[in-house]
Amino acid sequence: MTETLTCISPVDGTVYAERPAAADAHIQTTLERAGACQAAWRDVPVAERAALCTAMVDAFIKDPEDISEELARQMGRPARYGAGEVNGFAERARHMIAIAGEALADRPAPDKPGFTRFIRRMPLGVVLVVAPWNYPYLTAVNAIVPAIMAGNAVVLKHATQTPLCGERIARAFEAAGAPDGLFQVLHLTHDQTARVVASPEIDFVAFTGSVPGGAAMEQAAAGRFIGIGLELGGKDPAYVRADANLAHAIENVTDGAFFNSGQSCCGIERVYVHADVYDDFVQGMVEIAKGYVLGDPLDAATTLGPMVRPKAADFVRGQIADAVQAGAQALIDPKTFPRDAAGSAYMAPQVLTGVDHAMRVMTEESFGPVVGVMKVSSDDEAVALMNDSDFGLTASIWTADADAALALGSRVETGTLFMNRADYLDPALAWTGVKNSGRGCTLSPLGYDHLTRPMSFHLRTQV
C-alpha cells in the first residue's frame, strides 16, 4: 500500500498538503530519464545552460506573494519575510550562473613544447539533492543550479514538510523549456531516499539536514564511492568585544538568534560578551526580544511565527527548563506571549544568562528561539568557548577592529567567519563547515569543483 506523506501546517495544525510516496516503478523511470537527459545535456554549451537557468529564475520570481504564503503555511515563517527567500534564491542562482563560464573553463598546464595539456571539469552525471524545510528554496538552489550549470541532471527530494517547494521549482524549469528529465522531483520516505542514494543511477548526493540524517546518507552510499556533500547544521557562536558598536551588535545578534524562530543552521545559538559591555548588551537584547509579535504568520503584524511542529518547540522548552534547573536565569516571561504554551508550536523567544557549557542549551543544537549569553573577560576566553563545540558552520565577531577580527577569526574553528554581521550566505564565498557541521562545499567557484570531476588531457602535438 502506498504511503501518504503529509504536511501538517504549524499555523493551525491542519493538513495543508498530501502527496503519495513515489511508486518503485516511478522512481526507476525518473532515474533513467535523468540519466538519458544528462547524456545529452553534458554536451550543451555553458552559455545555453545559462540561458535556461536564467529563464528558470525569471519564471520562479514571478509569484513572490504566492510563494510567501505557501512558505508560511508549510513551515511557519511570517509571510512578511517570504520575499527574502525569493530574492535570495535569485541572488544565489544568478551568481552561480554568472561565474560558471570561468569556473568550468579548461585549466591549462604550463607551456611545454610539443604538447597541449589541460584539465577539464567534467559533469558527474545525476545529482540527488535532498533539501530541508527551514529554508526550502535557499538550501535547494545552492546545489540545483550549479549542478545543472555543470552539465548534470538533478533529482530533488524535498522535505515532507515543504512538498510544494520542489514542485514550484519544477514548474519554473518547465516554463523555461528545460529538456525532459533535466530536473525532476520525487516525493520519498526516508527508506526510499536511502534506496535512491544506493541506486547506481545516482552519481552525487547533496544533502542538507541533521547530523543523524547525514550519517544515514553516508551509510546508504557505503561502498559506492560517490561524493556526498553534507551541510548538517551548527551551534553558531557570536563574540561581542568591548569595542563593538553596541547598538548595531545588539540589533543584529538578536535578529541572528531569533529570525525564522531560530530555525536556521547558521543562526546564532550562543553569545559571548566582554564583561565591559555585558550588562548593556543583555539589557538591549531582552528589550528587542520582548518586542517580537508571536502569532499567525499570515498576519502582517507577526514578526515571530510558530516553530515547524509542536514537538520541536517542546524540545527547546526542555533545553530551557534543564538550564534553569541547573542555575540559568530565563529573562523573558513566556506568559507575556499569550500564544506560547506547552505542546504548541508557538513559542516565545528566550534569553538565558548564568549559562555554561555543562548545559545542553549551550552545546546541543537548539534550532529554536533561545540563546544563551555568557560573560567573558578576554579574547582568548571567547575563542576557547567558541571552539568548544561539536559544530563549526559559522561564527561572528562584533568589533570595530578589523585586524583583531581577522586575527581572532583565524583561530576559530568554523566554515565562515563574519565580522559585524551573521546568518547570511554570500554566494561568492564557499559555503562549508567543519566538525559535525559537515563536509564538502557549495556556492563560489569552489562549489563547482564538488559537482564535477577533473579529467586531464595530455596531447602530444609533435611526433
Image: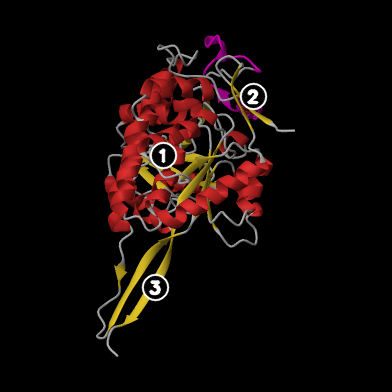
- Say which residue label 3 marks: 456
Tell me the distance, in whole angstroms, between the alpha carbons under discs 3 and 1.
45 Å
Query: Magenta stretch?
Result: 316-343
The image shows residue 371 at horizontal and vertical percentages of: 51, 30
Q: Is residue 5 left or right of residue 79?
A: right
Q: Are marks 3 and 1 in contact (CB under 8 Å)?
A: no
User: How far separated are the C-alphas under marks 2 and 3?
Assistant: 54 Å
At 38% from the left and 63% from the top, the residue drawn is 121
Q: Name which quarter of the figure residue 102 lies in.
A: bottom left
Q: Which of marks 2 and 3 is nearer the N terminus?
A: 2
Residue 139: x percent and y percent? Answer: 46, 39
Q: Nearer the viewer, residue 400 or 219?
A: 219
Residue 212 at least partly seen = no
Q: What amino acid type is highlighted by mark number 1?
A: Tyr
Q: Is residue 267 magenta?
A: no
Counting every numbered tag in the picture gives: 3
**Residue occupying image coordinates x 65% and y 25%:** 311
> Is residue 328 located in the magenta-colored stretch of the structure?
yes
Q: How crowded is mark 3: few (under 14 residues within 10 Å), some or many (20 or more)?
A: some
Name the residue that disc number 2 marks: 314
Q: What element carries label 3?
A: strand
Q: In the image, which is nearer the foreground, mark 1 or mark 2? A: 2
Report the disc number at residue 239. Answer: 1
Q: Which of marks 3 and 1 is in front?
A: 3
Give the quarter of the image for residue 89: top left
Q: In this view, does 119 lie above or below 41?
A: below
Label 1 packing within 10 angstroms: few (<14), some (14-19), many (20+):
many
Most extreme residue toward the right is 1
Q: Identify which amino acid the numbered label 3 is placed on.
A: Ser
Across and down, in percent, residue 213 comes to 62, 44
Q: Which of 28 and 58 is in front in this view?
A: 28
Distance from the alpha carbon under mark 1 to that under mark 2: 28 Å
